[in-house]
Amino acid sequence: MKPWIIVFRKELKDLFRDRRTISLLSIPVLLLFLSPLAFFFAAFARTVKEAQTYLGLLVLAALTPSMIQMVLQSKVQNLELLLPIWSHNYLINEVLRGEPLSLAQWTLPSAGALLAGGLLAALAGRLYRKPDFIF
């Protein structure tokens, strides 16, 4: 085995041992949910100004559950980990507190975000395929 491969493997092990790094790696997965969500809601706007209004309200609606969770400081159950924004906020809070997390608590938020993002991307794609929708 080449020496640089051994060094690379060791660095990857050290990288994934740190929970903050894994938490940071889950954020791009959340973006795969947020992008189709923004496209889906912006599809219903007729003007750019109207789309900006919708997206501003969407940000507020997305942050409201996270604010509630931060105030209540409640533990999230297994099925709640599939809710994209709620579960990622919980994941970041637990990492910052130094709480131990199971493998399911790492993978379920990403799986929920990818599933919801794929569904929203498919719905937005169906809307944009209609000729009368765009013109």
Image: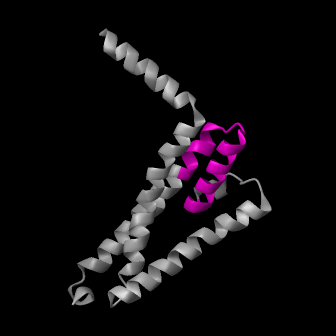
| Residue in the foreground of this view, choosing between 51 and 110 | 51
Q: Residue at x 20, y 85 (%)?
A: 131
Relative to 36, say whether 89 is above or below.
above
Q: How many marks?
A: 0
Relative to 123, say whether 34 is above or below.
above
Q: Quadrant of the N terminus?
A: top left
Q: Is residue 98 magenta?
A: yes
Q: Residue at x 65, y 56 (%)?
A: 79
Residue 119 % position (x, y):
42, 66
Relative to 105, say whether 134 is above or below.
below
Q: Quadrant of the C terminus?
A: bottom left
Image quarter for residue 98? Answer: top right
Q: Is residue 79 magenta?
A: no
Q: How is the image coloured?
A: one colour
Residue 77 % position (x, y):
71, 53
Q: Residue at x 70, y 36 (%)?
A: 100
Horizontally, residue 43 falls left or right of residue 60, namely: left
Q: Principal SS element in the magenta part?
A: helix
Horizontally, residue 95 falls left or right of residue 24, namely: right
Image quarter for residue 106? Answer: top right
Residue 120 % position (x, y):
41, 69
Range drawn in magenta: 83-109
Q: Residue at x 39, y 83 (%)?
A: 51
